Amino acid sequence: DDENGESSANGTLEIAVHQSLAPLASNAFLDMVRAHHFDHIYLFRAVKGFIVQWGIESPKPAGEASNKVKFPKVGIDPPPADKGDTLRSNVRGALNFAGGNSKTGQVYINRANNPHLDKEPGSLPFASLDEASMAIVDSVYSYKEGLGQVKAVKKGDDEVRRLFPRMSRIERCWIVDG
């Protein structure tokens, strides 16, 4: 937080998608990016030392087209052959679908090593962030869970600003080849 109590989470997150290691989840995520699902979307769950989660859409202002798309639940990518493969483990900076289910359109980034999440079906990450991006993730303000964040996000920007003025938002998500 800055001296005015505002969230200081600002910058570009660079997400490396590991298509060769997790093609089903990777392609589902990239399809969501192409559909602009993650544009103008709030980081509604931010738990210090655990995760930051997003993917619930807010209503669009009058006159703006919704980017609401139904996403299929994809199959589960096989676990890595090498049990020590940290690219497919819930370590700091790893990105995964919430609950291991792509259908929700929700993803989370691990703020810390969370190996207990590796045991959940479908919960092996498909992408990762570097430390520069994680510094931005670490600056996301963490509200206590269960205060009505999801309900506020579903009602829209005015409700989020009124109840959760420090809640961060992703403005735009795009694919860069390279």
Image (cartoon, rainbow, N blue to C red):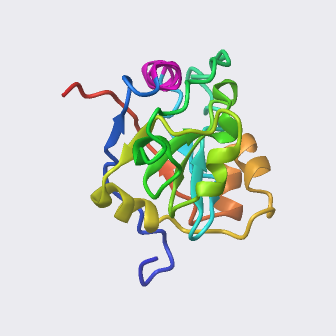
Q: Position of residue 169 (x, y in %)?
A: 51, 50
Which residue is at the far front?
82
Percent x, y of residue 126? 47, 34
> Magenta segment: does it hold 7?
no
Q: Is residue 9 above or below residue 58?
A: below
Viewer-closest of 157 and 88: 88
Front residue of 1/159: it is 1
24 relative to 168, above or below: above
Q: Main secondary structure of the magenta part?
A: helix
Task: Name the side, left or right, on which 77 lies relative to 154.
Answer: left
Residue in the image at 66% along x and 15% along y: 72
Relative vertical location of residue 84 with respect to residue 39 in this rendering, above or below: below
**Rendered-image quadrant of the C terminus:** top left
- In magenta, the rendered stretch is 23-35
State which quadrant residue 49 falls in: bottom right
Left or right? Give the position of 24 relative to 150: left
The image quarter in which residue 127 lies: top left
Q: Position of residue 141 (x, y in %)?
A: 54, 68
Q: Residue at x 50, y 47 (%)?
A: 89
The reply to whether residue 129 is visible in this rendering is yes
Residue at (62, 46) in percent of width and height: 118
Measuring from the top left, give residue 48's x and y in whole percent. Answer: 58, 70
Q: Is residue 103 above or below residue 113?
A: above
